[in-house]
Image (cartoon, grey):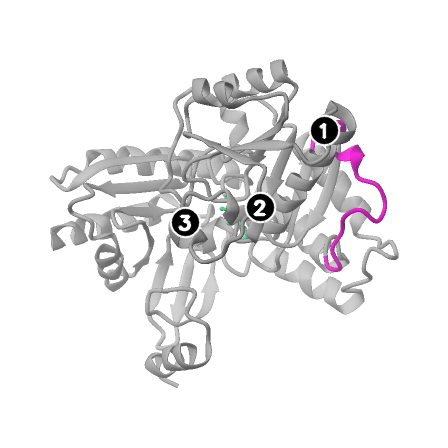
């Protein structure tokens, strides 16, 4: 079948809730993907940072196949021999003391929201039904009704009400606004260390440190959504390390499975997680043996192959080289680790057209909003391959 026919099938039979670049992929290895006609591309999105370990990593694949031959799903009605070791390894690596496994990122965010609400009522002493959670403008935490209830993205919200109450929004990166929004009913602050979907927005230095301090002072749970920033993406295992802090709840997902399987988790550094009692929350697939085996291998690969250090090193090189590119339409380049972006002036826009041109140069990147292009390749990338991306970026700039 031709690319055109695959695209036709998607358009004819699928819901139109995405607008993908017109490239039909059928194979991937490391940082590379191939389309059905055999054209090769350097993947600069890495499935929104779910494939940090690179496409079809052989060690994760082996773990998946081996576990699939033994046991895939028990439900949590019974125990399985992968869950305990997964918990232990994840806790040791992240310095956490409790884990709650789920599948998608949005489910893990929902889990954190439920947990802090219950903590608010049973530990902090907030009156039933009054718990408030503070979130940030331009946040992205997923697509469920409760999560889009506190989104500022009209596309994500319009037509989906009525919405879930109990959320307050403040500007991202502004500690004074955050502190001013706190009331006796505030149970948590939910924030991304770097706002990925908003266009790789990096808060001022010291922001999270001050946020941590304010949360302590007001007895508020700090929830960091590290679904995209976590697991090596920003050059640290968790982005919180850049500020030397620890969240109370940390949400991870995406690269937790290296792209093989949906696996997410809420990590708890405090007693907050202890408020959940048997029967109060769960998921049929959450913590299943196949997911746990895959996640254990995916975590192992991050460390064995020093991917976190590589992200830091290649990311720094990438950003420095980006900064040397000067073009009248570039407003800013920014990044941390291998999470980078070029922002064009808003009146220029052109991000989508730019991505289409990059594709012709063999680089797949994704526009966010009309004027921002994100670069987030798998963390296995090497210096020469970063250079290939940089060359493509330079070559395509004259489209403006
Ligand atoms: C991707 C993402 C989510 C949602 O994860 P899904 O697996 O798509 O539900 C939540 N938060 C952040 C920061 C993300 O990048």
Residue under the point 74% across and 52% down = 287
Q: Which mark lies nearer to you, 3 or 2?
A: 2
* Residue 52 seen: no
Q: Say whether marks 3 and 2 touch (CB < 8 Å).
A: no
Provide the residue span drawn in magenta.
Answer: 268-285
Q: Which residue in the protein does label 2 denote?
A: 164
Callout 2: SS:
loop
Residue 34 at x, y = what percent?
Answer: 39, 68
164 and 225: which one is in front?
A: 164
Compare residues 170 and 378 and report the one nearer the observer. 170
Asked if one can make out residue 125 in the rendered structure from this viewpoint, the answer is yes
User: Of marks 2 and 1, which one's residue comes earlier in the chain?
Assistant: 1
The residue labelled by disc 3 is 377
Frontmost of labels 1 and 3 is 1
Mark before the other along the chain sequence, 3 or 2: 2
Residue sitting farthest toward the bottom: 1
Instruction: State the residue position of label 1.
Output: 127
Q: Quadrant of the N terminus?
A: bottom left
User: Could you classify mark 3 by the number of other residues whose Cα lies within 10 Å: few (under 14), some (14-19), or many (20 or more)?
Assistant: many
Rendered image quadrant of residue 341: top left
Of helix, strand and loop, which mostly describes the magenta segment?
loop
Q: Position of residue 186 (x, y in %)?
A: 61, 26
Q: Is residue 288 above or below residue 223?
A: below
């Amino acid at each position: 079948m031709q690319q055109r026919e695959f695209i036709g099938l998607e358009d004819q039979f699928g819901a139109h809730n995405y607008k993908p670049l017109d490239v039909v992929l059928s194979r991937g290895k490391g940082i590379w993907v191939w389309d059905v006609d055999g054209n090769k591309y350097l993947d600069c999105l890495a499935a929104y940072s779910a494939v940090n370990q690179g496409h079809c990593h052989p060690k994760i694949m082996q773990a998946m196949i081996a576990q699939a031959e033994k046991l895939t799903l028990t439900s949590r009605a019974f125990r399985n021999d992968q869950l305990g070791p997964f918990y232990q390894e994840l806790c040791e690596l992240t310095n956490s003391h409790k884990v709650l496994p789920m599948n998608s990122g949005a489910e893990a965010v929902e889990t954190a929201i439920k947990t802090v609400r219950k903590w608010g009522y049973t530990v902090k002493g907030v009156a039933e039904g009054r718990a408030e959670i503070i979130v940030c403008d331009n946040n992205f935490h997923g697509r469920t009704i409760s999560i889009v209830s506190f989104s500022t993205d009209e596309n994500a919200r319009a037509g989906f009400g009525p919405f879930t109450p109990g959320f307050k929004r403040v500007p991202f990166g502004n500690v004074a606004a955050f502190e001013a929004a706190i009331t006796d009913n505030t149970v948590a602050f939910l924030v991304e260390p770097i706002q990925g979907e908003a266009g790789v927005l990096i808060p001022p230095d010291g922001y999270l440190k001050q946020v941590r301090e304010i949360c302590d002072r007001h007895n508020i749970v700090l929830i960091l959504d590290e679904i995209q920033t976590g697991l090596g993406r920003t050059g640290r295992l968790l982005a919180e390390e850049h500020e030397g802090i620890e969240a109370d709840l940390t949400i991870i997902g995406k690269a937790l499975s290296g792209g093989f399987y949906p696996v997410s988790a809420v990590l708890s550094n405090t007693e907050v997680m202890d408020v959940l009692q048997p029967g109060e929350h769960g998921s049929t697939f959450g913590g299943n043996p196949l997911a746990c085996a895959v996640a254990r291998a995916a975590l192992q690969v991050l460390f064995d192959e020093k991917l976190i250090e590589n992200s830091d090193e290649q990311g720094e090189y990438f950003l420095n080289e980006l900064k040397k590119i000067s073009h009248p339409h570039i407003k800013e380049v920014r990044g941390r680790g291998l999470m980078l972006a070029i922002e064009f002036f808003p009146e220029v826009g052109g991000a989508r057209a730019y991505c289409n041109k990059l594709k012709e140069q063999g680089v797949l990147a994704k526009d966010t909003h009309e004027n921002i292009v994100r670069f987030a390749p798998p963390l296995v990338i090497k210096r020469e391959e970063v250079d290939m991306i940089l060359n493509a970026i330079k070559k395509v700039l004259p489209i403006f």
